[in-house]
């Protein structure tokens, strides 16, 4: 059985995706087990000694000055969960929920949270047996972590709330019973340890960055097809040009383009048909490359976050100390996810401009208007460009940063919040729009190649073209276009184009 062993320090983005989307199992390392048990002993010592420690023997937020006696700690932790489960909106997708549970388990396994080993194992059992809590997507400020959505996760652990089990929505209690997982009676520190963290925003953002990196390769494929459809000039992609402005993303993109277009009979050299192309063709390495550099930065930040302790207070069992700090604050992720949304938006911005050049007879170097032979009787790709423009405009609204906003909460105790989960959700929504725009461009580019007369495509673009044509034929007379767009988008989601290209010509950058 395929599994990931977690220790709080070495989880990778790729492993997260395996658990979230491919159902890989999760197991605690022996080192993690020992660290968790040691930290728990210290929490018990604090409780027995009636030491005043935030969230262990006190209330929460503004109520941190209210001391809770030992026999009330169980009630305190349960009340924390049921009162904080205030999420609203549509449930998060199942892969995001699995990612949330994995990230929370990994953070707890670092041994700084003071949770009981048995409680942590319950969360891991839920991952492994497919009990997926219903977690509404809205309601987090991303300040004291993702309190509201994580509380919905914990509701199921205590036999409350709702969950999906084997494709069916049911009560949390019923799901746990059917999966043969015992529910938990939370005790001191545990409720707080489970909901005080950034795992919701990080799961959404981690899956989005993984998809973004793959989508950036699709953007290079789409651009290459359009370069051929417009008899674009390849000189601008020359390695010498990139070498004297050595941004990694730019260099990688130019290399991808030349690899994909190798042996093409439809590209040109400068001076053959014209001296230079418009920016949407000539500057592909610089623009796509900028987004790739953005994605690399965000990936680096996410890989730090997925192996961090983000709750409060933190237990340092070696020093027998406990510190109330601010690792739960989502600002590092909020800024990163806002940046991610901007980087994604630019891929669609450029794609729509290339699409416009394909459909506009003033810009297309001899192609028929809107890529259809009997124009007037047929509208061809006219409204495809409308739709792409609409998505690009929507992305511009969504790309406004969430992290520049803050609304104080908890009677001004939490007087600056990150809005990081909003930033992550926006980036996810932008990614969906970008994929659709790229699908539209690829459709139009393949149509233009046919109208131009396919004289022989590059060794990479030919693979992409043939995959599209397996499912979508050349459009001679108007047909219902949304179906074709959706079909092309599904091809992109399947990653078939990138997989087959990379199998044939090597890994794209």
Image (cartoon, rainbow, N blue to C red):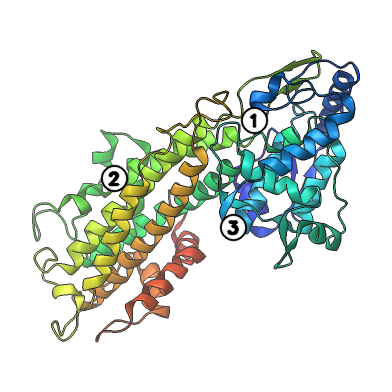
Res. 368 image quadrant: bottom left
Mark positioned earlier in the residue sequence (2 or 1): 2
Front: mark 3 or 2? 3
Residue at screen point 36% across, 75% down: 482
Q: Is residue 390 above or below residue 319?
A: below
Asked whether residue 264 is in view, the answer is no
Label 3 vs label 2: CA separation? Answer: 31 Å
- Residue 18 image position (x, y, % from top left): 65, 53
Asked whether residue 149 is in view, the answer is yes
Front: mark 2 or 1? 1
Q: Secondary structure at mark 2?
A: helix
Is 204 in front, or is 8? 204
Q: Residues within 10 Å of mark 1 (few under 14, many from 20)?
A: many
- Residue topped by disc 1: 310
Q: Secondary structure at mark 1?
A: loop
- Residue 14 image position (x, y, % from top left): 60, 47
- Residue topped by disc 3: 93
Label 3 vs label 1: CA separation? Answer: 23 Å
Q: Is residue 439 above or below residue 35?
A: below
Q: Secondary structure at mark 3?
A: loop
Circles 3 and 1 in contact, beta carbons < 8 Å: no
Residue at screen point 50% across, 62% down: 499
- Residue topped by disc 2: 287
- Residue 467 left/right relative to 120: left
- Residue 488 left/right relative to 96: left
Is 478 in front, or is 418? 418
Residue at screen point 28% across, 57% down: 351
- Residue 374 image position (x, y, % from top left): 15, 85
Q: Residues within 10 Å of mark 3 (few under 14, many from 20)?
A: some
Residue at screen point 27% across, 33% down: 245
């Amino acid at each position: 059985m395929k599994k990931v062993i977690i220790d709080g320090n070495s989880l990778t983005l790729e492993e997260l995706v395996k658990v979230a989307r491919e159902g890989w199992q999760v197991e605690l390392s022996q080192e993690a087990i020992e660290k968790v048990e040691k930290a728990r002993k210290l929490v018990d010592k604090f409780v027995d000694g009636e030491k005043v420690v935030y969230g262990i023997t006190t209330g929460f937020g503004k109520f941190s000055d209210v001391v809770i006696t030992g026999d009330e700690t169980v009630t305190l932790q349960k009340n924390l969960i049921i009162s904080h489960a205030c999420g609203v909106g549509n449930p998060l997708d199942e892969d995001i929920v699995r990612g949330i549970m994995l990230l929370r388990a990994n953070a707890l396994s670092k041994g700084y949270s003071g949770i009981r080993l048995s409680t942590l194992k319950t969360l891991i059992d839920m991952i492994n047996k497919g009990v997926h809590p219903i977690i509404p997507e809205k309601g987090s400020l991303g300040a004291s972590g993702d309190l509201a959505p994580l509380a919905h996760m914990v509701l199921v652990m205590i036999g409350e709330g709702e969950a999906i089990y084997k494709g069916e929505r049911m009560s949390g209690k019923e799901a746990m019973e059917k999966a043969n997982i015992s529910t938990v009676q939370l005790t001191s520190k545990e409720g707080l340890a489970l909901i005080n963290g950034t795992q919701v925003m990080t799961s959404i953002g981690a899956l989005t960055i993984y998809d973004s990196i793959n989508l950036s390769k699709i953007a290079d494929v789409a651009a290459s097809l359009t370069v051929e459809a417009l008899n674009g000039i390849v000189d601008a992609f020359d390695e010498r040009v990139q070498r004297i402005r050595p941004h990694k993303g730019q260099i990688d993109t130019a290399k991808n383009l030349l690899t994909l277009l190798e042996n093409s009979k439809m590209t040109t050299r400068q001076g053959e048909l014209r001296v230079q192309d418009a920016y949407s063709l000539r500057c592909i390495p610089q623009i796509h490359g900028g987004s790739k550099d953005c994605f690399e930065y965000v990936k680096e930040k996410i890989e730090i976050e997925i192996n961090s302790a983000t709750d409060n207070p933190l237990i340092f069992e070696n020093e027998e100390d406990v510190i109330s700090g601010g690792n739960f604050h989502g600002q590092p992720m909020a800024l990163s996810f806002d940046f991610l949304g901007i980087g994604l938006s630019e891929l669609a911005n450029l794609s729509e401009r290339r699409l416009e050049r394909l459909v506009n007879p003033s810009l297309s170097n001899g192609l028929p208007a809107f890529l259809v032979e009997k124009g007037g009787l047929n509208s061809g790709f006219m409204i495809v460009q409308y739709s792409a423009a609409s998505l690009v405009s929507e992305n511009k609204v969504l790309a406004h940063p969430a992290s520049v906003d803050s609304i104080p909460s908890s009677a001004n105790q939490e007087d600056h919040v990150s809005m990081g989960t909003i930033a992550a959700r926006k980036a996810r929504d932008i990614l969906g729009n970008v994929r659709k725009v790229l699908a539209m461009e690829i459709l139009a580019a393949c149509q233009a190649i046919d109208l131009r007369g396919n004289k022989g495509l590059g060794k990479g673009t030919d693979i992409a073209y043939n995959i599209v044509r397996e499912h979508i034929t050349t459009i001679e007379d108007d047909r219902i276009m949304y179906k074709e767009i959706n079909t092309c988008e599904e091809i992109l989601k399947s990653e078939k184009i990138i997989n087959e290209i990379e199998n044939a010509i090597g890994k794209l950058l």
